[in-house]
């Protein structure tokens, strides 16, 4: 079964989605399950994990509502304010929802490079294991030092690094990112998504060979049991169509055994998110 471990839905609002700049104008519109279902049918994708794009509880409820009425949405990664004194009450509110698999915060947009290590955020993270929730780590490479300290603090918490930590592929930067990702990968509770790569390259001029060393580093470091395919649809559409995004991963793992390919293309996501 092929599972897309990372995609988004939204009703486009200019203020809410202000991060969609002029260079990304092609995605300034609504993206809903009926749009994605057609794409999946064309590409043989059997299910997905819907991930938050807005930092509100309303966003979490929106995604859970879509999951309850669309069987191909197998799970939801929502948002809750993990820094809040009321976080326990919020987690309790969602504990019986079968579609809620984990949480994410848009840490990449935080000015504080050590946001992940602050006591109030760590307190919220410390509560997740009890509920069986996962946590998606969304950061830029300059925040990976904090990520390394962060995952050390919570050895029993299931983490996944989104978008291979968004290396600066367009600029060709590699060494610092690679060193820290290797260190992070040594923690067996941390997975990594092969997703969101095309938007870190030049939207118009990227070529598959640009991604080889980045993907190979992830394969060598995390191994085939802790990597999962994700499209980052519809964000990916600013640089590539769905076929191009899927083929980028499929071609990169083509020399692996069939079993290993199946893990990356779906089985690992099912295990990690308990789909």
Image (cartoon, rainbow, N blue to C red):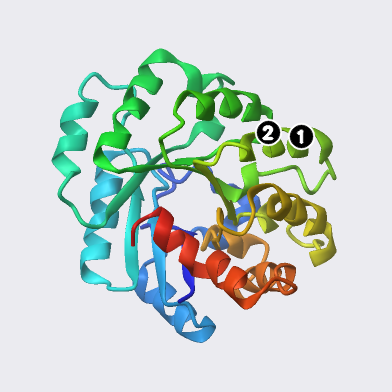
Residue furthest top as drawn: 119
Q: Kindly identify the residue that appears in the image at 76 percent across and 56 percent down.
A: 216
In this view, the residue in front, 162 or 232, is 162
In this view, the residue in front, 270 or 83, is 270
Question: Is residue 60 positioned above or below 237 on the image?
Answer: above
Observer able to see residue 168 = yes
Specify whether 139 is left or right of 102.
right
Screen quadrant of the N terminus: bottom left
Q: Which mark is residue 179?
A: 1
* CA–CA distance in space, label 1 to label 2: 6 Å
Dot 1 crowding, Cα within 10 Å, few <14, some 14–19, many 20+: few
Screen quadrant of the C terminus: bottom left
Question: Is residue 240 positioned above or below 63 on the image?
Answer: below
Specify whether 183 is left or right of 106.
right
The answer to whether the residues at label 1 and label 2 have Cβ atoms under 8 Å apart is yes
Question: Is residue 172 positioned above or below 37 on the image?
Answer: above
> Picture coordinates of residue 211 (x, y %)?
78, 57
Number of callouts in the render?
2
Q: Quadrant of residue 166?
A: top right
> Picture coordinates of residue 125 (x, y %)?
36, 28
Q: Kindly identify the residue that appears in the image at 15 percent across and 49 percent down.
A: 96
Specify whether 132 is left or right of 273.
left
Report the residue marked by disc 2.
183
Dot 2 crowding, Cα within 10 Å, few <14, some 14–19, many 20+: few
Specify whether 44 is left or right of 79.
right
Q: Quadrant of residue 229?
A: bottom right
């Amino acid at each position: 079964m092929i599972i897309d471990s990372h995609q988004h839905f939204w009703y486009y609002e200019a203020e809410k989605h202000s991060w969609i700049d002029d260079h990304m104008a092609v995605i300034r519109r609504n993206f809903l399950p009926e749009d994605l279902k057609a794409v999946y049918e064309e590409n043989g994708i059997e299910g997905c994990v819907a991930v938050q794009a807005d930092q509100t509880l309303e966003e979490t409820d929106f995604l859970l509502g879509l999951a309850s009425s669309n069987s191909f949405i197998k799970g939801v990664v929502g948002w809750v304010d993990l820094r809040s004194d009321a976080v326990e009450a919020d987690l309790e509110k969602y504990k019986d929802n079968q579609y809620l698999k984990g949480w994410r915060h848009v840490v990449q947009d935080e000015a504080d490079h050590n946001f992940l290590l602050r006591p109030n955020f760590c307190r919220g993270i410390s509560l997740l294991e009890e509920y069986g929730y996962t946590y998606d780590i969304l950061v830029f490479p300059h925040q990976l030092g904090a990520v390394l300290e962060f995952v050390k603090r919570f050895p029993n918490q299931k983490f996944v690094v989104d978008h291979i930590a968004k290396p600066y592929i367009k600029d060709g930067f590699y060494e610092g990112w690679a060193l820290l990702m290797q260190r992070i990968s040594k923690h067996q509770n941390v997975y990594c998504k092969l997703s969101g790569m095309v938007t870190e390259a030049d939207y118009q001029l990227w070529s598959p060979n640009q991604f080889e060393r980045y993907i190979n580093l992830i394969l060598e470091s995390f191994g085939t049991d802790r990597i999962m395919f994700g499209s980052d649809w519809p964000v990916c559409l600013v640089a590539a169509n769905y076929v191009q995004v899927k083929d980028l991963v499929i071609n990169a793992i083509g020399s692996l055994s069939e079993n290993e390919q199946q893990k990356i293309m779906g089985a690992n996501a099912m295990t990690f998110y308990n789909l």
